[in-house]
Amino acid sequence: MPQRVHIARELAEVFKLIAHPDRIRLIEELRTGECDVNTLAEKLNLPPTRLSQHLSLLRTARMVEERRLGRQHLYRLAQPQIAGWITDGLAFVEARAPAALAGELREVRELWS
Amino acid sequence: MPQRVHIARELAEVFKLIAHPDRIRLIEELRTGECDVNTLAEKLNLPPTRLSQHLSLLRTARMVEERRLGRQHLYRLAQPQIAGWITDGLAFVEARAPAALAGELREVRELWS
DNA sequence: TCCATACCTGCAAATATATGCAGATGTTAC
DNA sequence: GTAACATCTGCATATATTTGCAGGTATGGA
């Protein structure tokens, strides 16, 4: 039973790391491969500083990996399968707010697959 | 692109709901079927009030459903597959803290399957 | 060397979450 | 009705997360 507590704590950390709208879009954006911070910031329409903070969090947790190319920092998912796992969670979004979101869910599933 | 923001927000809500060690154990405890609050509190070794607060959160989010039997409130997962999805996340725990946790991970996977 | 570019870090304020406790509600048994 | 039980709700405090901003580091080019 103590091991359940311990592992539950670790799992919760992983969920917390993902539990932010910016970071979810960030991870889905990286599903197709590595990208530099400014390009990401543009694609996600976020201030680069904020993105950098999210990346720093994910980097510390080893959820993303960094590679430097000249003055750019290229980021990629440490475990690319994580993007697919996250979109699997869309099934549970469906239950919370069913009717109105159906169309959007379809589009996003297409986009993030 | 706006739909991505919207859906990402919804997904983040789901992740936040799960992102707590007590709630993860709670959901895994319910994977085998419905249970009343006091029994859950004992099994999880948590004060009943605290458990009740977690349940209230999950209930509002329609992640669990309630049924009353006498003075007991029986709770069950609204979508039982969510327990399996959460344990799929153990794969990403492995990357964060690999060596030391290997044994515990094996035990918990067994327990939560 | 000096400047611009591309990112990062630290800090403080705003916001959100978690927790404990006191008291309320609904149910059953006497 | 009264008492005990099972659980819920509200509120205050403690703690954690998010965000913006100001200033810092590293790289490449003139």
Image (cartoon, coloured by chain):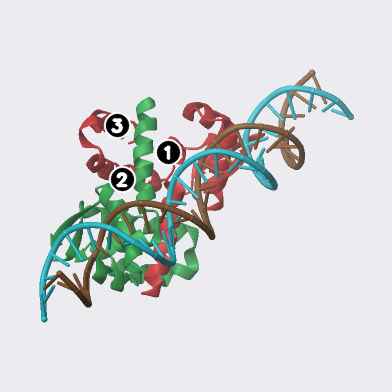
Chain colours: A red, B green, C cyan, D brown
Could you say whether the residue bearing mark 1 is in a helix, strand or loop?
helix
Could you say whether the residue bearing mark 3 is in a helix, strand or loop?
helix
In this view, the mark in front (2 or 3):
2
In this view, the mark in front (1 or 3):
1
Query: Are the residues at dot 2 and dot 3 in contact (C-beta closer than 8 Å)?
Result: no
Q: Position of residue B37 (x, y in %)?
A: 25, 66
- Structural crowding at the residue carrying mark 2, measured as other residues with C-alpha within 10 Å and reported as few (<14), some (14–19) or many (≥20): some
Q: Which residue is mark 3?
A: A110
Rendered residue at 18%/66% (across/down): B72
Name the kind of residue labelled 3 in the image.
Glu
Q: Using the image, determine if residue B52 lies above or below residue D5.
A: above
Report if residue B111 is visible in the image: yes
Q: Position of residue D24 (x, y in %)?
A: 76, 41
Q: Nearer the viewer, residue B77 or B106?
A: B77
Rendered residue at 57%/41% (across/down): A53
Rendered residue at 44%/42% (across/down): A20
Q: Which residue is mark 1?
A: A21
Q: Which residue is mark 2?
A: A89
Quarter where residue A36 is shown: top right
